[in-house]
Each structure stands twice: as C-alpha cells, then as structure tokens.
Amino acid sequence: MNFLTIGSLTILLLLFTMTLGIPIGTAFILSGLLGSGILIGLNGALSLLSQTAYHAIATPTWACIPLFILMGAFAGIGSFAARAFRGVYGLTHGVPGSLGVATCFGCAAFGAISGSSIAATAIFGKLALPEMAKYNYDKKLATGCIASAGTFASMIPPSMMFIIYAMFTQTSVGKLFAAGIIPGLITATVYSLMIIYRVKKNPQLAPRFEKESWSFSKRLSEGSQLWPIALVALIVLGGMYGGLFTPTEAAAAGSFATLFIGWRLKDVKSFREVVMAMKDSANTTAMIFLINIGALYYSRVLAITRLPAELSRMIDALPVPSFVILLAIVLLMFFLGMIMVPVGIYALTLPIVYPIILRLGYDPIWFGVICLKMTEIGAVTPPVGLNVFAMKGVAGKDVSLEDIFAGIWPFVVCDLIVLVALLLFPGIATWLPNLLLK
C-alpha cells in the first residue's frame, strides 16, 4: 500500500468516525493513529502523537487561549452582553427593526471581549429573544438574526479561530486580529441594513413599538452603557498594537480588567460565580486543547503520507487562472462547513490548500479572513449549524429548528455579499493590519 493510498484512507476514516458521532478530537487521533501506524508502526505512531501533544501546547501562542476563554467567561457573569445590547439599542431606538439592529451591533461589541460564537448566541438568545417575542417580532427573523449575529464573536478579535488558524499556518495572531475588525463591522452593518429594508417592506416582521422619540441626551445616556466593553477592548487591542503587550499578556490583562470592572459595577455578585466561571473556562480549554492536538497530529500524519504535497502539485498544474483555484477552495470550505466543525475544516484543508495559496501569491492574512468568513457561514448552515442548535437550546419548544434554519438564509446571503467584497477587494482585510503592524 503506497503513501498516497494511506493518506486517502486516513481522510475517509476521519469522515467515517465523524458520521458515527465520535467527538472530533478523538476522531482526529483515531484516524491519525491508524494512518501513521501503517506507515511507521504503532510505537512510532504513539511517539509522534506524544511529540505533537507536547510541542503543540508548549508554544507561547497556546497560552493566550485559556486566558481569552477566561475573559469571555468573566464577561458572561459580568453582564457585559446585557450592557452591549441595551447600549446599542439606545443608539438605534426608533430605527425599523431596532431590536434586530441592536442585536447585530450588540453581538459585534460583545465579540470584542468574547471569542466564542456559540456563547454569544446563547447569551443574546436569553437577552434579545424575549424582548423580540414581547413585541411580536417574527420568530424566524428574531432567531435567525441572533444565531447569525453570534458568529461575529469569531471574526471580531479576540477570536479563537484566528489563533487556531495562526497555529496551522505560522502567521501573526496580531495581524489576524486586526484583519478581522473591519470585515466584522461591515458584516454587522450589512445585516442591519437588510433588517431595516425587510421591515420597511413588511412591517409585520417587526412591529413598531416606540411610542416616543428619544432626545439626544437620552440616547447618549443609554449608549454610555457600552463604556466597559470599550475600555476592555482598548486595554486588549490597544495594548497589543501599542507594543505594550504580547497576545498572551493582552489576554491576561483583559481577563483581569473584565473581572475587576464587573466587580466594581456590582454585576459580579459573589466569589462562587468567579469560581464557576473559572471551572467552565478550564473545561472549555481542555476540550479545545484536545481538539487542537488531534487536529495538529492529524495534519502531521497527512504530511507524512505526502498526500497534501501531491494534491497541491496537481492543483498547481491545472491550466486555469489562479482565481478559479481560489474559488474552488472557497466552495470546498463552504460545503465542508455544512458538515464539519471549523477546527476539522482547518485540519483537513489547510495542509493542502495553504501552500497553494502562498504559491499563487495571495496574502495569508487575507486568506485567514476568508477562512473565518466560511466558518461563520458554516456555523449557521445545515445540517451541523452549531449556532442554530445553540439558539434552539435557548429558544425552547416554541421555536423549531426549521424556523431557525428558515430565518438564517437572508443573513447567509449578506455573508456571501461580504465574502464577494473581500474576494474582489482584499484591502478590506489587509489595510488595518498593514497600518498597525508593518
């Protein structure tokens, strides 16, 4: 059995184990062990796994992951999401579909101190959905808006997926964080414009309930609730791009600032809440580390089979323009996003497509934003759609999965519009990192 055949079997085994419902981290390790066991024997396969586990976690980049997760957990118990929602709603009061618009920009603001799209969806589902139901918003619009807007936590820094992309590609975390800011804000804006247009066209989607117009001072007063989020974002991002902090130090400073502000505002009410947030963060970190170790081990096994290099050579030799190859890669990620979690997509595709992207002359930071946009779309599209299932868990029996999936498609169209803009105008993603980090 030659190397390429073993590589192909390794990929098929991964897909098979995932269809059986085996956790993704375990699926990576099992399929990698089989492939490497055939090639280098069981002892060699286990040795490779242990080396991968050590060297992967021993890198400084990994240290920032649990700290950013902890920062998001402290933000969750500190009512930062509620402040984001109320503050943005104060600024958008009177706009058609104002609660939906507030959800979009509230999720964008909360994403600046979160990093988990599932957590953002769950929290805003508890905050915004009851308000929308109270004022008779169409449940498809309401749930689709929350599930889709929750993905902003992946694009707007600090983003776990940008850190994981950086590990696979050895690119700068700081540049990736900066690259996600403008596309994230543009997506929130496009979502909001779509909501306003749909509600103007069909007012029954979001009946107007504002009885009076708010004065500028009242809007400013409500909008001022955003100051804790702005302060934490300034500490984390300003510290990184001002040269004061490394990403790990920025995550530590952000975690402390989030906890301290929550305590000073009396949103963090007991030490027990802090302990529970730390326990939840530890559990999430352990899960992410297992997935990432498995994914990195799997990608190393694929590299040993030479399958990625051979496929890269074959694709490179195709007599088609480079843009056609890029579109094929984007379409592949789109379809994989429907059936796999983001880390799985990265582990399966980046070892193959990333060298091709470099040889074609595309910017690796820009391509990281493209990958993130595809995983954002995958987070809401069937059959996996993790954000949709998180939304269903919050919405309860009154809302079906079919309602949520029906509600996300207008937002997916908006994502595709932003994706086309990013493909045609790469400067949308690369201008800010090139400005801040030359």
Image (spheres, grey):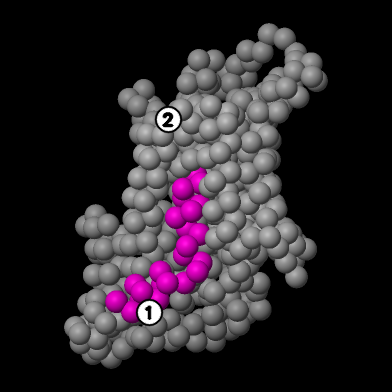
Q: Is residue 9 magenta?
A: no
Please report the bounds of the magenta region as a residue range. 49-72
Graded by Cα atoms within 10 Å as few (under 14), some (14 to 19) or many (20 or more), the crowding at tag 2 reads few
Give the SS element for disc 1: helix
* Residue 176 numbered mark, or none: none
**How many marks can you see?**
2
Residue toward you, 119 or 137: 119
Q: Residue at x 63, y 55 (%)?
A: 180
User: What is the residue that sits farthest to the bottom in this orientation?
Assistant: 2
Name which quarter of the figure residue 294 lies in. bottom left
- Residue marked by disc 2: 270
Q: Using the image, determine if residue 150 lies above or below residue 428.
A: above
Which numbered mark, 1 or 2, is in the foreground of this view? 2
The circle on residue 300 is 1
Residue 74 shows in this picture:
yes
- The residue positioned 31% from the left and 88% from the top of the image is 3
Estimate the spatial distance between the alpha carbons at disc 1 and disc 2, rounded to whole Å: 45 Å
Task: Tell me the amino acid under the disc marked 1.
Answer: Arg
| Residue displayed at 70% across by 53% down | 238
Residue drawn at (41%, 53%) of the image: 338
Q: Where 391 falls versus 424 (above or below)?
A: above
Q: Position of residue 192 (x, y in %)?
A: 65, 35
In the image: residue 128, left or right of residue 180: left
- Identify the secondary structure beneath mark 2: loop
Towards the viewer: 199 or 262: 262
Q: Nearer the viewer, residue 116 or 80?
A: 80
Q: Is residue 418 above or below residue 429?
A: above
